[in-house]
């Protein structure tokens, strides 16, 4: 066929031929439209900042992503194949900024075709501030009570301080960080447990481990009691001697469990000086001794007065 004949065959009835092509194209797109499906997934949102700045306001941690394509092109795609991020890394001044949310494809999403990806929201507005790093003490929060007649005598935490970082305006107001509740209910002996630190704010990060070790020292709960006046007795007297003591009464301070201390009084508590080894007249500075009688259980003498007394000894009848 000659070139002229080929040209004439193309031009001949050209409106009909153009219409036929248009119809074919429309049929193709209608077919694609009828076989296209939409699928929704939720993916984490990453905020990219420069090293010296942090987010100072709440922001969405996840975004909704719609995937549109042929039914066989995207059902193998999961959350790991799509990442969403917003880039604020060029911002070097505190303030509010608005940036679009961008999508990056990985794995199965790279080979899916056709694939249309949309994200909601399309952008976020975020306040950023300079990052502040600070070391603060850890404060234990002790709850409950130990067994009857027992108490926490002391405690320690390792580490006793931690490093936190976050927006300058928030970190400056934090002077300490508390632990979660430490329950000591019905304990009768020393113990140690791992305890998490209380969450202050989603914008605050604990640089080290978010956990400390608490050591509690449990002992008997002792009640103090002061007994006075207690007569100071002279024991071991010599009938041929007369005695003059500078203090006739004193006081005794005791510690014991509540069910014991309540039954101790002047009747079963005494003070005395022992003169059984002294048989020569003179002036003597002698130690005072505490004596407890008819007391059941452990009682600790924590102090008494006077600790010494002066006794003047003379022969009876001699002036």
Image: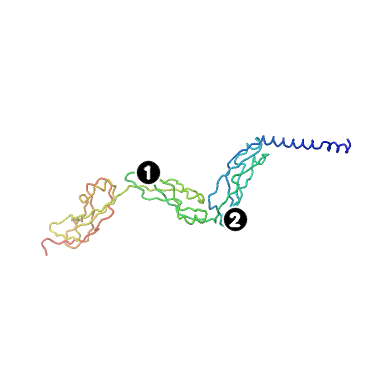
Left or right of residue 173, residue 81 in this image: right
Element on which disc 1 rests: loop
Q: Quadrant of residue 277?
A: bottom left
Instruction: Give me the C-alpha separation between circle 2 and circle 1.
Output: 52 Å
Q: Nearer the viewer, residue 184 or 201?
A: 201
For numbered disc 2, what is the local secondary structure? Answer: loop
In terms of depth relative to the viewer, which is nearer, 51 or 38?
A: 38
Pick whichever, 236 or 232, lies toward us. 232
* Quadrant into which the C terminus falls: bottom left
The reply, left or right, for residue 32 in relation to residue 225 is: right
Which residue reaches farthest bottom?
319
Mark 1 neighbour class, 10 Å CA radius: few under 14, some 14 to 19, many 20 or more: few
Q: Earlier in the sequence, mark 2 or mark 1?
A: 2
Q: Quadrant of the N terminus?
A: top right
Residue 185 spot, x, y in % from top left: 37, 43
Q: How many marks?
A: 2
Quick check: 70 above or below 303? above
Residue pictured at 55% horizontal, 49% vertical = 59
Which mark is drawn over residue 185?
1
Residue 91 is labelled as 2
Q: Residue furthest left?
A: 317
Left or right placement of residue 84 versus residue 223 in this view? right
In the image: residue 67, left or right of residue 279: right
Residue visible at 19% across and 63% down in the picture? 283
Q: Residue at x 49, y 50 (%)?
A: 201
Residue 295, percent from left and from top: 24, 47
Badge 2 crowding class, 10 Å Cα cut-off, few under 14, some 14 to 19, many 20 or more, is some
């Amino acid at each position: 066929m000659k070139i002229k004949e080929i040209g004439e065959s193309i031009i001949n009835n050209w409106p009909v031929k153009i219409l036929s092509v248009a119809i074919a194209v429309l049929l193709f797109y209608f077919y694609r439209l009828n076989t296209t499906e939409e699928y929704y997934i939720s993916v984490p949102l990453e905020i990219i900042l420069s090293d010296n700045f942090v987010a100072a306001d709440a922001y969405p941690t996840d975004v909704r992503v719609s995937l549109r394509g042929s039914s066989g092109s995207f059902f193998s795609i999961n959350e790991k194949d799509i990442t969403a991020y917003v880039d604020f890394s060029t911002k070097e001044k505190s303030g509010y900024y608005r940036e679009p949310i961008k999508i990056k494809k990985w794995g199965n999403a790279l080979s899916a075709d056709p694939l249309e990806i949309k994200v909601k929201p399309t952008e976020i507005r975020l306040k950023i501030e300079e990052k502040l790093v600070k070391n603060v003490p850890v404060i234990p929060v002790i709850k409950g009570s130990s067994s009857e007649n027992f108490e926490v005598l002391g405690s320690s935490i390792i580490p006793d301080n931690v490093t936190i970082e976050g927006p300058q305006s928030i970190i400056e107001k934090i002077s300490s960080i508390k632990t979660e509740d430490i329950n000591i209910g019905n304990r009768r002996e020393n113990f140690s447990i791992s305890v998490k630190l209380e969450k202050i704010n989603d914008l605050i990060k604990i640089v080290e481990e978010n956990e400390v070790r608490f050591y509690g020292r449990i002992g008997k709960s002792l009640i103090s009691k002061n007994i006075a006046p207690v007569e100071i007795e002279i024991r071991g007297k010599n009938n041929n001697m007369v005695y003059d003591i500078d203090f006739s009464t004193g006081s005794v301070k005791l510690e014991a469990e509540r069910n014991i201390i309540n039954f101790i009084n002047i009747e079963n508590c005494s003070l005395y000086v022992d003169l059984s080894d002294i048989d020569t007249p003179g002036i003597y500075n002698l130690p005072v001794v505490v004596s407890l009688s008819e007391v059941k259980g452990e009682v600790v003498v924590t102090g008494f007065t006077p600790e010494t007394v002066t006794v003047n000894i003379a022969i009876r009848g001699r002036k």
